[in-house]
Every structure is written in structure tokens, then in C-alpha cells.
Amino acid sequence: MVFRVQEWSRLLRLLCLLWPTSLPMKPRHLRSLLLCSFAASCFSLTASAVEPSPSLKQAFAGKFHVGAAINERMTRPDSPVHDLILQQFDSISPTNLLKWEPYNPEPGVYNEGPAEAYFTFGQEHDLYVLAHCLFWHSQTPKWVFLDAKGGPVSREELLTRMRERVRHVAKLYGSRTSAWDVVNEAIVEDGSLRKTQWNKILGEDFLPAAFRIANEELPKNVQLLYNDYNMEAPGRLAAVVKLVHDLRAQGLRIDGVGSQAHWRLETPTIPQIEASLVALRDAGVKVHFTELDIEVLPRNTGGAEISMREQAAPENNPYTAGLPPAIQAKLAQRYADIFALFVKYEDVVERVTFWGVTDADSWLNNWPVRGRTNHPLLFDRQGKPKPAFQAVIETASGKR
């Protein structure tokens, strides 16, 4: 039974009036006893009401890092998610601010303000700081691949520009970086190299060249990663495993592989994810789940190719008023199954990073369909934990 303050006060007066004078405890003593009891009850009730669940970083401490992808605005104290990031995560990834085009849009022009804010935020709060990414077919400015006359740049000049980029960020952020995604999404699902300007100019040497430069220019304590999506596709997985062996045969260091983990409610299956994880473990690298989110809305396209687009329609945006309980339960179970697998392989999993902090800032609100109301993360649009959050917490202790 919970008493309000007024009810406690009335009860106290009544007991003091009725207390027999022949008994040793006098009313004023009784009043003190009841006031102490009342205060203790209020403290207990208040504490139980505000006591939070263990945070994600607390729940998985000693197992793997848990992080979120953030932008520069989120590092500011007035950001609505600033405190949530520090409460829940021990790792951060940048969304766009270090990609070549946003960071270095023209020769000699650098947008260092957002990057500096990001690295300072990570350093001040002792976070595992991921830098994303050095080389990617998307969001690389056209000037990188062009010579002074507007034609294709030479192989030698492109390698020089790649080295200059790595040397520049190493000088500014090297000591504050935990890991770099050296190359992003260079292999397609059949295992072949993606046809891009990189391999058009550099050929089959693109990936080894990128890792060679990273090995030579970045500090030795910075982990070097290859990052891609749909790592469960057999062709891509086999090619990435081969890449690991080939790089090491050339004396080059690769510390881990990033599996982006842009997954859906039903796919890939847990056995498919496990098979990918085991194959990478057997290749001798740590596995980073780098961009985790669970798509709950229907769409026609698969994968996570950034150029894909679909037209908006009521049928592919059905949950504008909120996630129905049945879908909420499916999302919670899906996350529980995934994190149970991560815990099973905690000796291999280095980091799990969500691509966003809350549903409000998820990229899936605008990809591949613009303007949708998506619900792929553990925190809703107001930053409140969803049932999936508690489901994930329970996997850390084996309760689920």
C-alpha cells in the first residue's frame, strides 16, 4: 500500500491522540518514529521509481564495446541525446564528418571543426573512438580522381593523394583514434571488386595499396578494419576472408572486419550471422558490428547500397503513429536473439555500434525511401528505451 503525504499526516495525528498514556512511548516519541518511517518510505519509493536499468555499456562491460554513430551536433551539451550517449555507450562512430567529401571537399580545404569536436568529445569522456572511413566509392569528391586538365588522374598521383589524406588525419587525430575503417564497401556480393574509380585507376592493387598506406601512416596502436554490409553473403564473405589472408601474406596488418549489420526483422537468419562470424574468427581477426539497426518497414530493395531509392507510398510507411505492440515484440525478440549470439562469441566480438542513437536520427527515415517514420533502434523518438532495450540488457546476464 502506498500512502500519500496527507494520509500519513492524518494517520500520525490519529495515533498520537489514541496512544494510551500508560504506555512508555509518549506521543512525541511516536511522532518522531513515524516521521522517520515516513521519510524512509518516501526515499525508498523515490529511489525505486527513478532507479534506471543497467546501461548498455555497464551490461556488456568486459564483453565488448557498445557504441553509437553520432554527428557533431550530438557532442554539444544542449543536444537532446548528449546525456543519453554518455549514459549508455562507451564507443562512438562518426556518421559523415570524416568521409572524404564532407571533410576535404576541395584540394587544400578541410572542414576540421566538426572532426575536432568529435575527437575532443571522445577523448574527454574516455570513449573508444572509431574513425570512418578513409576510402569509399561514395562521398569521395570528384577532384580526387581528376588531373589538372580534367582527365583521369594517374595511378601515382592517386596514390599520392591517398597518402596525403591519411597523413593529414594521422597528424591531427592519430593519438585520439582507436580504430579506422580503412576501406568501406569495396567488394560486391559475388566476391568481385566493386567497379569504381578506385580500381579503375589502381586495379586489383586498390585494397592492398589502401592498407599499405594505412599501415605506414597511422599509429601502430590504431586498429585497421575493412568494413562492408551483407557480410552473410557467401561470395562477399569468402572474398573478405581471402583479403585478410592476402594482406597478411604481404606483411600488412589488418586487425578486424566490420560487419555493418543493417539487418531486418527476419533476415539474415541467426545461423547465417553465426556462420559469418565464425568464418571471420577463423581468419584470425576481431569482428566489429559497425552499423547495427533493424529495419521494421517493408521495402523492395535489399542490402545497404547507398544509391538505392524507392518511392514513398502508404504501404511502405505503415507505422507513422507508432510501432504496434506486435511489431514491438518482434523487434525486441530479434534484438535479443542477435545479442545472445554476440555474447556467445564475446571473445571474437570487439564492438557493437548502433547506426544512430534514437529512432529520430536513424538514416532509415530517409533511405531508401525519404520521409518515412522508422523504428530501428533501442530508443524511440523521445529517447525513451523501447522493449528491445530491456531485451538486450537481459541477454548480457543470460536472463533471455
Image: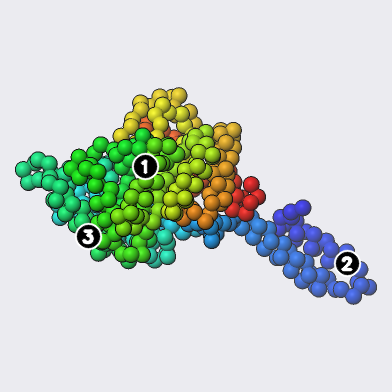
| Nearest to N terminus: mark 3 or mark 2 | 2
Structural distance between the alpha carbons of marks 3 and 1:
30 Å
Badge 3: how crowded within 10 Å, few (<14), some, or many (20+)? Answer: some
Q: Is residue 89 visible?
A: no
Q: Residue tagged by mark 2?
A: 19
Q: Residue at x 80, y 63 (%)?
A: 13
- Horizontal side, residue 191 vs residue 334: left or right: left
Structural distance between the alpha carbons of marks 3 and 2:
81 Å
Q: Nearer the viewer, mark 3 or mark 1?
A: 1
Residue 108, x across and y down, in percent? 15, 55
Report the front residue among 109 and 148: 148
Is the image coloured rainbow, by chain, by secondary structure, or in one colour? rainbow
Q: Residue tagged by mark 1?
A: 239
Spot the residue most to the right.
22
- The three-letter amino acid code for the residue at tag 1 is Ala
Up the image or down, 368 lies above or below 393; here it is above
| Nearest to N terminus: mark 1 or mark 2 | 2
